[in-house]
Amino acid sequence: MKIQVALDFSDLKQAIAIAKEVEEYVDIIEAGTPLIKSEGMNAVVELKKRFPKKKIVADMKTMDTGAFEAEIAINAGADIITVLGAADDKTIKDAIETAEKNKKECVVDLINTSPERWKEIEKLKPHYLGFHVGIDQQKKGVNVLEQIINLKEKRNIKIAVAGGINKDKIKSIADKKVDIIIVGGAITRSENPKNAAKEICEELNRFRKI
């Protein structure tokens, strides 16, 4: 189980500053969608340059031209790219194939999709299924733990989980043996991001040893 910090900022300097604070406690650093929209692929370039030992995610949330957008992100230094589960199957397939061709990985973000669609996407064999409850959904009371409650430990596709995750939810998520736990605001909006990341890492380490 790895920890991914989501840098959902609009300012690259702010994002880099937070990443430096939490670097030792996270495994993966994500250039969030707002950061990419604000700063472009330069955000991915700079994160990879400053944190070369970390995997960098370009959260593209691609909805069309899967191969083209995957290539853009990978050429900028991304190790992992994302495509939306609501996209056409061809878009998803093209993103996955482009990632594989470049020895990178692709997450299919399942935000606002149905369990029926999840089964269809699983057949496309992405590297990760990304169970994701967005901020607007969280405000309505949607909980990502409800989405992963029936996950089976034995599966061929890795699982990433995102959406309102904090220290208190780590145990419930870790019990499902997910592969990537994505944390945003609980770290980045904390008064002390380094300490918040440390606490989440220490909590997760309890279950990494089981």
Image: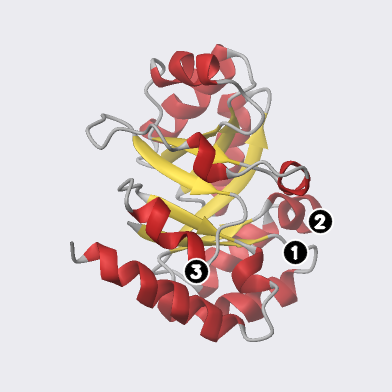
Measured in 3D between alpha carbons, the distance from the residue under mark 1 to the one under mark 2, in whole angstroms, is 8 Å
Which numbered disc, 1 or 2, marks the residue that appears first in the sequence?
1
Residue drawn at (39%, 32%) of the image: 150
Nearer to the camera, 5 or 134:
134
- For residue 167, the mark is 3
Q: Earlier in the sequence, mark 1 or mark 3?
A: 1
Query: Is residue 81 visible to us here?
Result: no
Position of the N terminus, as image quadrant, is: bottom left
Looking at the image, is 177 positioned above or below residue 47?
Answer: above
Residue 39 image position (x, y, % from top left) = 77, 58
Q: Give the distance between the C-alpha atoms of the residues marked 2 and 3, in whole angstroms.
A: 29 Å
Q: Amino acid at mark 3?
A: Lys
Residue in view at x 22 percent, y 33 percent: 154
At label 2, which amino acid type do we have? Ser
Q: In this rendering, does residue 93 appear at all?
A: yes
Mark 1 belongs to which amino acid?
Answer: Phe
- Give SS at disc 3: helix
Residue 37 is left or right of residue 122, and the answer is right
Residue placed under numbered mark 2 in the picture? 38
Residue 9 — which label? Answer: 1
Name the mark nearer the viewer: 1 or 2.
Answer: 1
For this rendering, which residue is in front, 76 or 111? 111
Place of residue 11 in the rendered image (x, y in percent of width and height, measured from the top left): 79, 68
Looking at this view, name the residue that lies furthest to the left: 210
> What's the CA distance linking mark 1 and mark 3?
21 Å
SS assignment at label 1 = loop
Q: Secondary structure at mark 2?
A: helix
Q: Which mark is residue 119?
A: none
**Pointer 1 and pointer 2: residues touching (CB < 8 Å)?**
yes
